[in-house]
Amino acid sequence: MMTKGSNTALVCVAAVLLRWCVSLHPYSGQGKPPMYGDYEAQRHWQEVTVNLPVAEWYVNTTDNDLQYWGLDYPPLTAYHSYLCGLAARRVNASFVALHESRGYESETHKLFMRYTVLVADLLVYLPAAYCLMSVLAKWRAGRLEFVCLLLYPGLYLVDYGHFQYNNVSLGLFVMAVAALTSGRDCIGAVLFCLALNYKQMELYHALPFFFYLLGTCFRQGGVLGLLWKMTKLGCCVVLTFSAVWLPFASNATVLSQALRRLFPFERGLFEDKVASVWCSLSVFVKLKTLVDNRNMALICLLSTVVCMLPSSLHLVARPTLRHLRYALLNASLVFFLFSYHVHEKTILLAAVPACMLVSEEPFMTTWFLTVSTASLLPLMIQDGLTLPLLALGVLFMALTHHYILPSTEKVAKRTRMWVWMRRTYFLSVAGLAFLTAATLFVQPPDRLPDLFPVLLAIYCCGHFVFFCLYFHYCQFTLKYNNNNNNSAVSNNNNAKKHVQRK
Ligand SMILES: *[C@@H]1O[C@H](CO)[C@@H](O)[C@H](O)[C@H]1NC(C)=O
Ligand SMILES: *[C@@H]1O[C@H](CO)[C@@H](O)[C@H](O)[C@H]1NC(C)=O
C-alpha cells in the first residue's frame, strides 16, 4: 500500500521529471540576435551584477547600457543574479565576461541556466508547496493543492522553457500564505515583502495581504491589541524593506534610479496579444492612438482600484483564511484584466492562487487553469515551445478530468446547474482546441496576420472575466465564522457544498 509520504515523493519526482523534459526545449530568443530574449536578460544581469559595484546596477553607464536588458526588477532579483553569476564564473568565466559575453549561447551554458532554475525550485518553490500542504492538513485539505501547485504546467513552461524565475517570487508568496494559515502573521508579512522585493508584480497580491492583516488587527480586542499588532507588523515590513534596499541607500540618486527602473511607464499598455480587457477592447477601439500613455496609465489605475474595492473591503470585514485565498485570486484576476503593461506570463500570478483553492472549487479552478495554460500559446509559439505546451496541456486536462470531474459528478448528478456547467466546460475546451488548431495550422488572411492569436486572446479574456465574476460571487457567499481556524478550510465534503451553493 502507498503511504502518504511515498505519494508526496512520487508527485515531487513527477514534477521534476516534467520540468526537466521541458528544459530540453528551446528558450526565448534562442539564436535571435541582436536582442535575444528573457534568457539573455537573465544572463546579462548575472554579467552586470558580478562585474559592477552595487551602486551601478540600475544606472546607465558606459559599462551598463540600460537599453540592452537593463535590470528592471527589485534588488532580490539582482542579488539572486549575483549569486548565479558567481556560480557561472566558476563554471566558465566567459559566461559572464563584461561586454564580451553578450548573447553568449552554448549547450553547457543552457544546462547551467536550467540548473539554476531547478535549484531555485528545490530551495524555494517545492518547500513552499510542501509547507502549504502541511498547514492545510489540519483541516484535511492541502494534498490537491500540493499536486496542483507542482504539476500546473503554465509555471514550469515559463520558467523552464521560456526562461524566468517566477518560482522564486511565487514560492515566497505561497510560503507567506502558508505562514498566515498557520497563524504566524509576522513571518507571513516578512515573506510577502521578500516576494515583492523579488518581482514587483507581486503587487497584484499586496492588497489582499494588506486588508487581511488589517482585518485581523481590528479583531485583536481593544485599542491596545490593535496598536500592538499594527506596530509589530509595521516593524516587520519596514525592517524587511530596509534590509533589502540597504546597499542602495548610500546615495539618493542611485535609489531613485533603481525605483524608476521598476515602474516603466513608457513601455506601453500591453505587450503582444494578451488576454486583458484593454487588449481585447483595442481590437474594436484603437486605444493606443486615442489616449496617450500617461492618461491610459491613469485610466488603468482607476479601473483597477475600483474593481479591487469590493473584494478588498469584504476581506477587511471578514478576515478569514478562506476569504483571503479567494481575495488573492480575485485581486490578481482584476489586476490582470485591467492594469497597465500586462504580459501573457502575468496570468501565472492568478494561476497560483487558483491552485491554492483547488480543493474548495475543484471544477472551476481546474477549468481556469486549463484556460490560463492555453492563453500562453502565442508566447510558446514564439519560443518554439508549442509541443510541450500542447502535451502538458492535454496531460493536465487528463489528470484533472480523472481526479476531479468524476468524483464531483456523483454528488452533482441531480442538479441541472451542474449538467449545464459540464456542458459549458466541454464547449469551452472545444473552443480552445479549435482556436489552437487554427493558430497553428490555418493560414490567416494577408490583411489580418494575427487573426487567430487575437481571437484566442479575446476568447481567454471572456473566460477570465467570467471566472473573475464567479470567484467574486464565491467570496461574497462564503459562510463567515468568526473563529478564524475553524473557517480556514471547510472540512466536510467540499464538492457537495460546492454544488449546493449554486
Ligand atoms: C545609456 O548609455 C548608452 C551608452 O553607454 C547610450 O547609448 C544610451 O543612450 C544611454 N541611455 C540613456 C537612457 O541615457
Ligand atoms: C569556456 O567557454 C569558451 C567559449 O565558449 C570555450 O572556448 C572554453 O573551452 C570554455 N572553457 C571550459 C573550461 O569549458
Image (tube, helix red, strand yellow):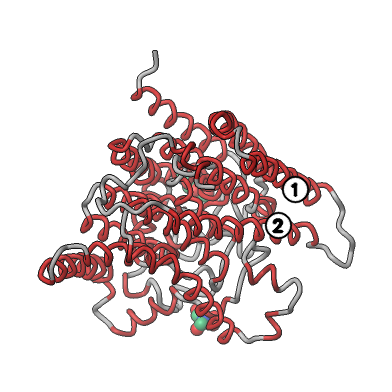
Say few, some or many: other residues with alpha carbon within 10 Å of mark 1 (under 14 / 14 to 19 / 20 or more). Answer: some
The residue carrying mark 1 is 431
- Viewed as shown, does residue 190 lie left or right of 120? left
Whether residue 276 is visible: yes
**Residue 284 x, y percent position in the rendering:** 76, 74
Which circle's residue, 2 or 1, is located before the other in the chain? 1
Residue 75 falls in which quadrant of the image?
bottom left
In the depicted view, which residue is nearer to us: 493 or 274? Answer: 493
Give the CA separation, mark 2 to mark 1.
8 Å
- Residue 257 locus on image (x, y percent): 39, 80
Q: Is disc 2 in contact with disc 1, using a CB cutoff of under 8 Å?
A: yes
Q: Amino acid at mark 2?
A: Tyr
Q: What residue is shown at x 44% (from left), y 46% (from top)?
A: 357
Query: SS at mark 2?
Result: helix
344 vs 64, left or right, is: right
- Is residue 416 toward the left or the right of residue 210 in the image? right
Q: Is residue 50 visible?
A: no
Q: Is residue 304 above or below residue 219?
A: below
Q: Residue at point 40% right, 53% down?
A: 325
Q: Residue furthest left?
A: 224
Q: Position of residue 171 (x, y in %)?
A: 38, 50
- Image quarter of the N terminus: top left
Can you tell me whether the CB of the residue at mark 2 lies under 8 Å from the nearest atom of ligand 1?
no
Q: Secondary structure at mark 1?
A: helix
Q: Position of residue 492 (x, y in %)?
A: 38, 35
Query: Amino acid under label 1?
Result: Gly
Please tell me whether residue 278 is drawn above or below residue 27 in the rendered image: below
Bin the neighbour count of mark 2 within 10 Å (Cα to Cα): few under 14, some 14-19, many 20 and up.
Answer: some
- Return the mark for residue 459: 2
